[in-house]
Amino acid sequence: MSFVHQCLLETKAPIPFPAAGLTIEQPSIRDIAMIGGDSALMIGVEALTKNYKKMVGELVSSDISNFDILMRTIKSPDEQSKFIFDAVIKVLSLLFPNTQVFFTPISMIIKSEDNEQHMIDRDSFDTLAGILYDMFCVAELHGDQIDDYNPVGPRAAALVEKFRKKRELLAKLRQERGDDDENISLFGKYISILSVGLKISKNELATYSVYQLIEEFKRFQLKEGFDYTFQAKMAGATNIKNAKDWMETIQIGKLEKDELELEN
């Protein structure tokens, strides 16, 4: 299930959010850099899309929603909660520019320049989470095989644990190489590769949304593989597997079977 029509994602159009009477803007990579880059973005997005209920299982009442758990988390006085709260505010500022964001015990309030107030509560929050999941390609960036965001359905704890271990391993490898995590940008790498490969200005690529950048990168990978295979066969090479059609429909967030085998 998708919460956002693909045409809106591909054209970076504003996304209707009628449950709260709002329209969600799709920020550019340059906009994201202004709040601290992709790492800051994903901390906030993960907080807003995480399936808390699955993680805590039977420890909470079935009446408690993901929204309730998130609100309790960001209101905690510890440093980690303050860090998450700050990231959530930054993400909301990107989604709803030129507004003020503040919280009540039971809602997030988005106040527009004309002082009109829009409320996001437990009834509308899951829709927001689903939109963000699609907009920011959460499954793609986390290597998640799950096709859709289901705030109350099964999300395997094994996958969550796999992602955690993968992030820990990557962090350890970066540390061993002496890399500066603060200056590493996945989106920056995509821009650098596409700029050379497609001869597109980096400044132009910086205006892309996250969805557009990742979709472009995946399409570029398919085209490169297709061209390489075609040229090799023209040169007489045999025993080469046919490349995928580079014009095929791209499913952002879905891993192909051979990629899953490599992961496992």
Image: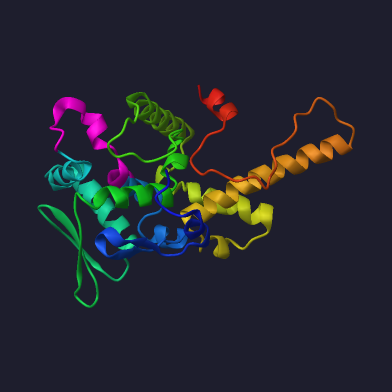
Answer left or right for 39 relative to 86: right
Magenta segment: 46-63
Figure check: 26 above or below 193: below
Please tell me whether residue 51 belongs to the stretch shown in magenta. yes
User: Is residue 228 or residue 122 the one in the foreground?
Assistant: 122
The answer to which image quadrant residue 241 occupies is top right
Residue 178, percent from left and from top: 46, 36
Residue at 34% across / 65% down in the picture? 23
Figure check: 112 above or below 146: below
What is the chief secondary structure element of the magenta stretch?
Answer: helix
Residue 185, percent from left and from top: 47, 48
The answer to which image quadrant residue 167 occupies is top left
Work out which quarter of the rendered image holds the N terminus and state it: top left
Residue at 24% across / 36% down in the picture? 52
Please tell me whether residue 139 belongs to the stretch shown in magenta. no
Residue 247, percent from left and from top: 67, 48
Answer left or right for 201 relative to 255: right
In this view, which residue lies farthest toward the right? 236
User: Is residue 188 or residue 160 the one in the foreground?
Assistant: 160
User: Is residue 217 or residue 242 the one in the foreground?
Assistant: 242
Residue at 23% across / 47% down in the picture? 83
How does the figure colour the protein chain or chains? rainbow
In this view, which residue lies farthest toward the bottom? 114
